[in-house]
């Protein structure tokens, strides 16, 4: 009996002996996850993730005085010209994590694949688009080493000079747009243009035009070169070429989510913006605005009291908090601040509203300025009218109830003709309107051009010295984990506050 | 670095062998008593020498056993000298045992379930008796042990009664990974997955994240154990004690033995009933001078409602306020909001057990039901457990034993804690101080049945709406147990195989209710809200074998063991989130518009071989050597094998020398050194970057086609070259018993080095990832523990005993990044002491960030600080707001001093004891106080209220006294917009009157003719009183964050409770 036990015991032991880690290599292979995927899907994600983060309502859109909230705490930002770290880091977090990391992945994994050359160039264009937004917000940022945490194990990327970043963006846009090849592989799964190479080329050159114009103040010569290259390459030709995220019920518009939910009753159109539209009887006011007449609270903003008539719209003045605004509310004979006009959350900021990133309207207005400066051929007045018309036509894409009839567009253009004597102000004021809800672009163009002519936010307790917020502060996480590189950037660029100007703004 | 046993495999077996044998035997019976006072001794082991046949005496000291003529009976009992009696033809053998004052005699269950005499051990252990677990109990039994074991730090979370229990032995050593001890039941490890969620956790401790904003504590592996089933519990504290358990035991082991046989003959029936009432401890001390409103204005018709802001006007008699529902009510303080909302909870546990025991084996079967209702009005927890343990000797030499434990748990609506959205506790702690609760209750719904918007801060869901509409159910079915076959080949040699499995399925469902004000509307034709349903399955199998031999050669003894183990863990997750519904209030996946499924799967293995040899000399000098080799499937082939040794020794000097002073009853010194390797911080498949495809397609441009969106999985940079973490620990100890055993002391000093830690360290977002997994650094835990028992007074009728236990531990971060050759590297090139970020507060890093910094204690709390000049005055900017310095260090969040003092009094059998415990030497960041501050509830926001502007006390940036006033509400709200965490950093220490127990055993008054054989009644009180604390408005133990490394980051949890109740034990 004893022997039976011992022999059984030992034979079991022997039988199962082979190697202590036999099968471990196979065991540690994830059976349910892919180690690769068609990279067009990754680019798709980068594109859809580019929809502007909601923090740009608080800062970018607030700085250019289109929307404002009287509330403080979480909502503090451009309304009081104060620092709010959580909101200031929105662009950084969204674009680095969701757009740049994806585009870098696509670029690195397709760069030596001839059949995916078009995809590679599309990703280069999209990366440039994202970096324009990021560097415009913060100035010097990690660029050349960005997004390479896995590829090169670079977890603490260096900050690059904005000048060097723009130089490379211009190079990338120039090369990638030129290299796009209509006879190459058509990336038909591309969610932006279904792989249409001509449209991607026009997007690339329109972004080159955008990047070039950005340098008009700091280096007109380089600006002119880039603008001319873009113009020769061929920019967007109609609203069909617009780069737009058409949000769906599955992939909703971040602004739409915010402005229909937690902050539904907290953001209002400014009097600056409402009055700018109303002073010219701009039909866009009727397409954008709603006023919940007589509302005394968020709960009182019901469909029954919604009024979309441009005549009744009243914008909220900036420079007030939710207490100091009370006398204004009273003097305007409003029921409460909930009675001011809002951007209509059932139309242009509904949860499935599209988000326009780069538009034909913006492109035409940039060309209007370029033509006015003599950098490109063509009549500034024509570009100007095309731009305004295109933007007005854009509203049909938000909602049928926001569509602006052609007759109204014609009438407005007839009543507000291009005036060469006041060209830059007129063009850039229209650019400001045409970039409504595109905070990063509206804010950058305002800093570059100085238009529209906005007045300083009069709020009494501000944390800026100048008239306007000039840049976003860096995320405090960078202070914790990437301090050496951050410090070098601050040393070069100037104090990490809302006042320091970025390179092209100096 | 790389050492490996020449190994080719691990044998794991199951045997089915049948043995039969018959004997000619007599039956011998008798009574065993104490020679000193002639009282009967129950529980004495009676064994036939050189066999496995044996029994134990019953409650009257009686035994009965079959013995053949010529065999010898061995009587042994803890604290008494062993006695052997040869049997010829006697049928009655009464035995009187002599007390053995020199022998501890205590038997300790050590690693792998091997029982050892305590005096042989060269390392520290801590034990608790079943009474310490059972009588004054908590829902998760571990929480009842707070302050009772030296060196063991137990933390409850403010997450409801069924929440997890955080156990740390000898402090925290891992920078970013797990620090929890291994739980072993009857020699086999079980899973102890922690379902306390961890928002913002960057660690790699496998914390489970829920979807959306759900943040409840779903309990841990300990919460499915019925304390009535526990026969003994031992904590193996150090790596030395745990060396044979290898990788997972680097933070110690909790060894639980469950009952496997009865103590008397025949079927014993025991009934235990325990009832406690839990009363919320409400410690809020809000300001009640200024009421609801913002900027110094109370809500009137033309003004916005605030709901959660108390920056209104000074209360004056006769004032009114207009509430969100348009009703005008008096403007007056509402002081009892929390109490009005919360109810008293209660816990009712009933256990009935059947047992039987003979010399050849026995069984214990218990059935228990625990019903708990939480202080949150919709929270309840029910646990049913069935436990069967048995042991049986088959034939002469084969022993089969095993246990099976089935538990069924239903946890309904565990509170949402450490969370902003849909968290009732967070809202309760932020409601404006003049908001009447009955108005919130009666106006929770609008005409459409949606949430009636009551605050401009819509994430603050009306708690009554939340209670009515948000639900969460967690169902867990769990079966764990093991089967052991042991064959005694010779009387000095045995072989054993054992297979254990822990298997559970856990079904969880929760919703985000339709109509909540914080949710965006659904597309036309649908209603908003979402619903999540998920099933998790986990299977952990441990199979091991063990061969052991014991020989004596004169004065020398050898005890050798060799064995192997294979661990296999497989986990699976099926989860679907559905958003927007067709039919309102029908929360099923099939009723949803969009569905987002997740399937998760992982498996891993650890193979091990190990051996131990114990040498003894004359029963007073012991030397124990062990070695273990582990192979980890999660690591790369070059790094997966690791060999580590341990050596321990024990010297009982009181036995070795004859000339000891008479007051010294027992003396022992011990020393130990061990190494352990671990992969516990590496998940399966951490070696690769993965891609995936989103659940839903996206339209292709303006075409009708749709295309997938792909994603790069995870925000952690994978690392294929991780090495096993290494722990080495040395300890020495001293045990003394003096003055007729009236004073006993047990000291331990230890030094533990943990290196090659595997950490998920936060990195720059600009890298595209948020963390990277690296082999990083070294920590040193150093400390001492003591257990001192003193009997200051003893007489025939009265005995007073005091027990002090405590520990001092500091964990120093010695290195953060080391290269392969062990040298330091300036990790991110910034010239600072090396540091890594392991996690942030749920709001923002500025509120609280946990870092590991070289040269500092582990778990340093960083937060944005007020800028100060050289004289310590705060600096203000030109707008009158404080200037903020980002992320400054404030101190460690891990307590240095943990301990307890128990006083027990016994007067003629009436027992009274109380326990005072403490944790000291650490700090915390309080999210509750942060919310209270920015919402104007905190008393600290009173200055400046009269004018509603405030001039901060300090200087401006030019060094002049600040004269600029800032608007009051914004000034205080700077703590939010600038995340000034410094304002909410508190000393986290406390002294508590933890437990009071009073009881009496009526057994001796019960006539022998009654069917009741025993009766004991105890009255209990738990968490009775906070004697001292430093944090405002909350109990310092009311923490959020179940995560392993995010200690000290409090974010509102459920108030702790004070419990009163009784425990009744009846034996039949």
Image (spheres, rainbow, N blue to C red):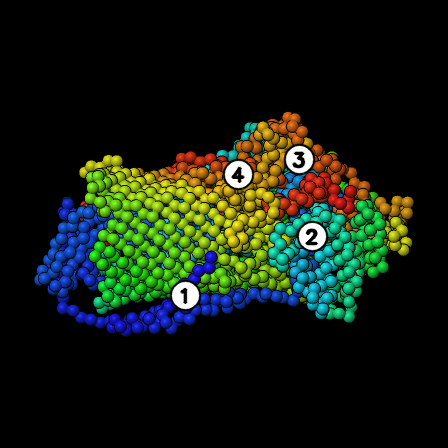
Residue at 49 percent across and 45 percent down: it is B813
> In this rendering, does residue A272 appear at all?
yes
| Nearer-the-camera pick, A348 or B1021 | B1021
Q: Chain of mark 3?
A: A
User: Quarter of the image holding residue A78?
Assistant: top right
Q: Chain of mark 4?
A: B
Rate crowding at label 4 as few (under 14), some (14 to 19) or many (20 or more) other CA atoms within 10 Å: some
Rate crowding at label 3 as few (under 14), some (14 to 19) or many (20 or more) other CA atoms within 10 Å: some
Query: Which residue carries the number 1 mark?
Result: B6
Q: Is residue A433 left or right of residue B566?
A: right
Query: Can you give x and y, in whole percent of width and height, for residue B636 in the image?
Result: 51, 62
Residue at 14 percent across and 47 percent down: it is B35
Q: Between tags 4 and 3, which lies in front?
A: 4
Q: Marks 1 and 4, Cα distance to the nearest angstrom? A: 50 Å
Q: Marks 2 and 4, Cα distance to the nearest angstrom? A: 34 Å
Q: Marks 4 and 3, Cα distance to the nearest angstrom? A: 36 Å
Q: Chain of mark 2?
A: A
Query: Which residue carries the number 2 mark?
Result: A143
First in residue order: circle 1 vs circle 4: 1
């Amino acid at each position: 009996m004893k022997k039976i036990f011992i022999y059984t015991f030992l034979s079991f032991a022997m039988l199962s002996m082979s190697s202590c880690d036999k099968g471990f290599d196979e065991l540690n292979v994830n059976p349910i996850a892919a180690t690769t995927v068609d990279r067009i899907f990754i680019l798709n994600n980068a594109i859809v993730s580019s929809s502007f983060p909601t923090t740009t309502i608080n800062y970018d859109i607030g700085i250019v005085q289109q929307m404002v909230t009287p509330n403080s705490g979480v909502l503090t930002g451009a309304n009081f010209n104060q620092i709010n770290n959580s909101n200031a880091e929105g662009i950084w977090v969204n674009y680095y994590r969701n757009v740049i990391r994806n585009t870098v992945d696509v670029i690195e994994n397709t760069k030596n694949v001839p059949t995916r050359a078009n995809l590679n160039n599309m990703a280069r264009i999209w990366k440039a688009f994202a970096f324009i937004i990021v560097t415009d917000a913060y100035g010097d940022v990690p660029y050349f080493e960005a997004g390479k945490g896995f590829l090169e194990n670079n977890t603490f990327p260096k900050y690059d000079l904005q000048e060097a970043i723009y130089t490379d963006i211009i190079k990338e846009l120039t090369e990638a747009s030129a290299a796009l090849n209509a006879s190459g592989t058509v990336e038909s799964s591309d969610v932006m243009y279904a792989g249409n190479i001509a449209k991607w080329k026009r997007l690339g050159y329109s972004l080159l035009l955008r990047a070039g114009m950005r340098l008009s103040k700091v280096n007109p010569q380089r600006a002119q070169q880039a603008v001319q290259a873009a113009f020769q390459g061929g920019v967007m030709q109609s609203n069909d070429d617009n780069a737009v995220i058409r949000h769906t019920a599955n992939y909703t518009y971040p602004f739409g989510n915010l402005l229909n939910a937690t902050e539904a009753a907290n953001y209002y159109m400014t009097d600056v913006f409402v009055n700018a539209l109303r002073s010219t009887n701009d039909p866009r006011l009727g397409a954008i605005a709603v006023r919940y007449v007589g509302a005394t609270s968020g709960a009182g903003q019901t469909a029954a009291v919604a009024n979309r008539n441009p005549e009744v719209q009243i914008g909220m003045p900036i420079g007030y908090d939710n207490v100091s605004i009370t006398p204004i509310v009273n003097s305007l004979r409003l029921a409460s601040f909930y009675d001011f006009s809002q951007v209509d959350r059932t139309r242009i900021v509904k949860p499935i509203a599209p988000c326009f990133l780069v538009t034909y309207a913006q492109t035409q207005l940039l060309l209007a300025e370029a033509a006015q400066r003599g950098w490109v051929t063509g009549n500034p007045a024509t570009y100007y009218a095309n731009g305004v018309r295109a933007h007005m036509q854009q509203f049909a894409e938000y909602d049928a109830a926001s569509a602006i009839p052609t007759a109204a567009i014609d009438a407005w253009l007839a009543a507000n003709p291009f005036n060469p004597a006041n060209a830059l102000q007129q063009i850039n004021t229209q650019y400001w309107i045409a970039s409504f809800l595109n905070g990063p672009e509206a804010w950058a163009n305002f800093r570059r051009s100085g238009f529209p002519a906005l007045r300083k936010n009069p709020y009494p307790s501000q944390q800026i010295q100048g008239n306007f917020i000039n840049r976003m502060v860096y995320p405090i996480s960078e202070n914790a984990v990437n301090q050496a590189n951050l410090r070098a950037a601050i040393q070069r660029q100037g104090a990490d506050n809302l006042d320091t100007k970025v390179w092209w703004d100096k | 670095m790389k050492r490996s046993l020449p190994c080719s495999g691990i044998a794991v077996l199951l045997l089915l062998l049948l043995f039969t044998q018959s004997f000619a035997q007599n039956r011998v019976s008798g009574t065993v008593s104490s020679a000193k006072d002639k009282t009967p001794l129950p529980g004495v082991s009676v064994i036939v020498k050189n066999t496995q046949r044996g029994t134990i005496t019953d409650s009257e000291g009686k035994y009965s056993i079959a013995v053949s003529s010529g065999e010898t009976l061995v009587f042994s009992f803890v604290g008494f000298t062993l006695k052997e009696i040869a049997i010829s033809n006697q049928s009655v053998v009464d035995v009187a045992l002599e007390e053995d004052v020199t022998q501890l005699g205590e038997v300790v269950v050590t690693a792998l379930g091997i029982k050892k005499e305590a005096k042989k051990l060269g390392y520290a252990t801590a034990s608790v008796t079943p009474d310490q677990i059972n009588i004054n109990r908590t829902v998760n039994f571990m929480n009842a042990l707070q302050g009772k074991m030296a060196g063991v730090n137990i933390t409850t979370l403010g997450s409801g009664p069924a929440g997890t229990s955080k156990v740390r032995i000898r402090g925290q050593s891992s920078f970013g990974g797990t620090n929890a001890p291994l739980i072993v039941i009857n020699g086999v490890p079980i899973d102890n997955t922690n379902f306390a969620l961890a928002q913002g956790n960057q660690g790699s401790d496998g914390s489970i994240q829920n979807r959306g904003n759900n943040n409840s504590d779903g309990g841990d592996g300990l919460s499915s154990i019925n304390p009535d089933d526990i026969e003994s519990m031992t904590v193996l504290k150090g790596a030395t004690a745990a060396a044979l358990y290898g990788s997972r035991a680097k933070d110690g082991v909790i060894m639980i033995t469950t009952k496997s046989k009865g103590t008397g003959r025949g079927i014993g029936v025991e009934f235990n009933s325990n009832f406690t009432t839990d009363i919320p401890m409400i410690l809020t001390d809000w300001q009640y001078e200024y009421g609801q409103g913002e900027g110094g204005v109370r809500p009137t018709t033309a003004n916005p409602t605030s709901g959660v802001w108390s920056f209104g006007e000074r209360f004056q008699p006769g004032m009114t306020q207009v509430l969100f529902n348009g009703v005008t009510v008096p403007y007056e303080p509402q002081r009892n909001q929390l109490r009005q909302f919360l109810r008293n909870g209660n816990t009712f546990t009933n256990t009935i057990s059947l047992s039987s025991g003979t010399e050849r084996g026995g069984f214990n079967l218990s059935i228990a039901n625990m019903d708990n209702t939480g202080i949150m009005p919709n929270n309840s927890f029910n646990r049913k457990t069935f436990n069967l343990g048995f042991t049986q000797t088959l034939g002469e030499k084969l022993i089969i034993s095993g246990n099976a434990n089935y538990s069924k748990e239903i946890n309904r609506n565990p509170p949402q804690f450490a969370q902003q959205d849909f968290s009732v506790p967070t809202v309760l702690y932020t409601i404006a101080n003049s908001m009447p609760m009955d108005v919130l209750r009666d106006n929770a719904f609008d005409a459409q049945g949606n949430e009636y918007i009551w605050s401009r801060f819509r994430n603050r869901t009306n708690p009554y709406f939340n209670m009515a509409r948000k639900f969460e159910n967690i169902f867990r079915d769990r079966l764990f147990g093991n089967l052991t076959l042991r064959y005694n080949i010779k009387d000095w040699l045995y072989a054993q195989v054992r297979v254990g499995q822990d298997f559970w399925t856990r079904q969880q469902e929760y919703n985000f209710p339709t109509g909540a004000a914080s949710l965006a509307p659904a597309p036309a034709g649908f209603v908003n809200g979402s619903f999540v349903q998920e099933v998790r399955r986990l299977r952990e199998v441990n199979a091991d074998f063990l061969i052991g031999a014991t020989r004596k050669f004169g004065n020398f003894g050898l005890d050798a063991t060799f064995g192997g183990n294979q661990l296999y863990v497989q986990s699976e997750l099926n989860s679907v989130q559905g958003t927007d519904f067709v039919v309102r209030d029908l929360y099923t996946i099939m009723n949803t518009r969009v569905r987002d499924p997740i399937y998760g799967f992982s498996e891993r293995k650890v193979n091990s071989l190990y051996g131990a040899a114990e040498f003894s000399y004359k029963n007073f000098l012991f030397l124990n050597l062990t070695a273990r080799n582990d192979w980890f499937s999660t690591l790369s082939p070059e790094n997966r094998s690791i060999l580590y040794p341990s050596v321990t020794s024990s010297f009982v000097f009181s036995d070795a020398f004859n000339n000891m002073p008479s007051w010294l009853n027992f003396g022992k010194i011990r020393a130990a050194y061990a190494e352990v390797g671990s992969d516990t911080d590496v998940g399966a498949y951490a070696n690769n970057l993965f891609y995936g495809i989103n659940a839903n397609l996206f339209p292709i441009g303006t075409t009708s086609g749709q295309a997938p969106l792909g994603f790069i999985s995870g925000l952690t940079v994978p690392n294929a070259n991780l090495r096993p973490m290494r722990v080495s620990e040395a300890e020495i100890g001293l045990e003394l018993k003096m003055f007729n055993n009236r004073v006993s002391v047990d000291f331990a000093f230890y030094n533990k080095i943990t290196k090659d830690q595997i950490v998920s360290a936060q990195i720059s977002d600009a890298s595209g990832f948020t963390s990277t997994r690296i082999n990083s650094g070294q920590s040193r835990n150093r400390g001492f523990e003591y257990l001192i028992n003193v009997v200051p007074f003893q007489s025939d009728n009265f005995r007073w005993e005091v027990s002090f236990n405590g520990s001092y531990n500091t964990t120093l971060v010695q290195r953060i990044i080391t290269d392969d050759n062990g040298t330091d590297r300036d990790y991110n090139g910034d010239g600072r002491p090396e540091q890594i970020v392991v996690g942030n507060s749920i709001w923002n890093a500025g509120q609280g960030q946990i870092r590991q910094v070289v040269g500092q204690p582990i778990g340093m709390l960083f937060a944005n600080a007020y800028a100060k000049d050289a004289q310590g005055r705060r600096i203000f900017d030109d707008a009158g707001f404080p200037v903020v310095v980002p992320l400054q260090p404030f101190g460690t969040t891990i307590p240095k001093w943990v301990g307890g003092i128990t006083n027990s009094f016994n007067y003629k059998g009436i027992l009274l004891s109380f326990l005072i415990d403490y944790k000291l030497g650490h700090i915390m960041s309080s999210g509750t106080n942060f919310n209270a501050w920015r919402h104007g509830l905190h008393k600290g926001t009173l200055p400046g209220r009269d004018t509603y502007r405030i001039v901060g006390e300090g200087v401006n940036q030019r060094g002049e006294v600040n004269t600029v006033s800032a608007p009051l509400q914004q000034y205080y709200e700077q703590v939010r917009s600038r995340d000034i965490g410094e304002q909410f950093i508190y000393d986290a220490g406390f002294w508590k009157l933890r437990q009071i127990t009073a009881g009496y055993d009526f057994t001796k008054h019960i006539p022998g003719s009654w069917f009741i054989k025993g009766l004991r009644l105890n009255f209990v009180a738990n968490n009775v009183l906070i004697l001292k604390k430093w944090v405002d408005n909350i109990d310092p133990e009311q923490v959020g964050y179940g995560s392993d490394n995010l200690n000290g980051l409090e974010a509102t949890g459920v108030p702790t409770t004070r419990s009163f109740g009784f425990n009744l034990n009846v034996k039949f």
